[in-house]
Image: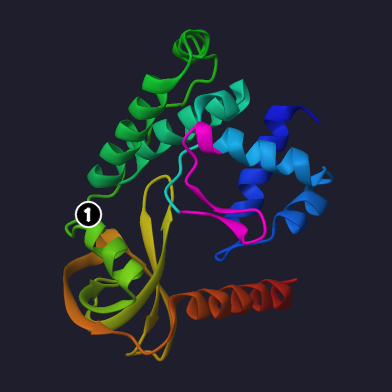
Amino acid sequence: MSRTNRLLDLLQLLRGYRYPVAGQVLAETLGVSLRTLYRDIQTLQAQGADIEGEPGLGYVLKPGFMLPPLMFTREEIEALMLGSNWVSQRTDERLADAAKEALAKITHVLPSDLKEYLSTSHLILGPAPEQKPVRIDLSLIRQAIRQEEAITISYSDERGNRSEREIWPFGMGFFEQVRVILAWCTLRNSFRHFRADRIEVMAMTGKRYPRRRMALLKEWKHECRNEATSAR
């Protein structure tokens, strides 16, 4: 294993711990000597990694550290570029701007050879299809999901029937032409999928829904798997 890959593995390993982990545990997991581990930690700290700790007490990686450019391969850079371009063309304005800014930041710190390679990439994203117009601010939906906050919506189904609902959003799906909000609907007392282009009005309630978002997502996935199995 190259030293660069070992340093990357060490960072990924540290990301899995919220509290200090003993150097011996890290060394054994990576298959290196304790002396090599201490030297690798010093190298990462010199590169800007916010690793706190010392021998005998353990080490913890503080959140927010960005991987240095040398740890991106050409394929990883291409994947980031392609993904950023997809987001910038096929999501809402706020996410599109964030994707462009993120790609610009990555490009700015790339070595010159990777910058040139990226500018001449052979990966081309096809034109985005025309998407259904959306009346609401999707960034507020994402905010409600992050905060586990209930929202109220005025929704029209495929027949044009309008209803007022309180929902607990826990996910959002981006398709070629539509955006779909995954939520628990208190009116139907079940999981429902709401097309964003059919939501006429939405409002934040300011109250947290009574279940955790991850629990809802897990239950929704389980229900989807059961439905798929039954349909076979």
Residue at 28% across / 77% down in the picture? Answer: 149
Region rendered in magenta: 45-62
Quadrant of residue 87 in the image? top left
Question: Which is nearer the eye, 3 or 180?
Answer: 3
Q: Position of residue 147 (x, y in %)?
A: 31, 72
| Number of numbered markers | 1
From the viewer's perspective, is residue 92 above or below residue 188? above
Locate the N terminus and report the quarter of the image it occupies: top right
Specify whether residue 51 is painted magenta: yes
Q: Residues within 10 Å of mark 1 (few under 14, many from 20)?
A: some
Q: How is the image coloured?
A: rainbow
Residue 109 showing in the rendered view = yes
Coordinates of residue 181 in the picture (x, y in percent): 37, 66
**Residue 158 appears in the rendering:** no
Residue visible at 52% across and 14% down in the picture: 114
Give left or right: position of 116 versus 162. Answer: right
Quadrant for residue 135, please give it.
bottom left
What amino acid is found at the position of numbered circle 1 in the picture? Val
The residue that mark 1 highlights is 134
Asked whether, in this view, residue 43 is left or right of residue 29, the answer is left
Question: Against 187, is 135 above or below?
Answer: above
Callout 1: SS: loop
Q: Nearer the viewer, residue 181 or 62?
A: 62
Is residue 61 found inside the magenta-colored segment of the image?
A: yes
Nearest the eye: 165 or 75: 75
The residue shown at (60%, 37%) is 42
Q: Is residue 197 left or right of residue 136?
A: right
Q: Give the camera-side residue of 106 and 66.
A: 66
Q: Position of residue 159 (x, y in %)?
A: 29, 71
Figure quadrant of the C terminus: bottom right
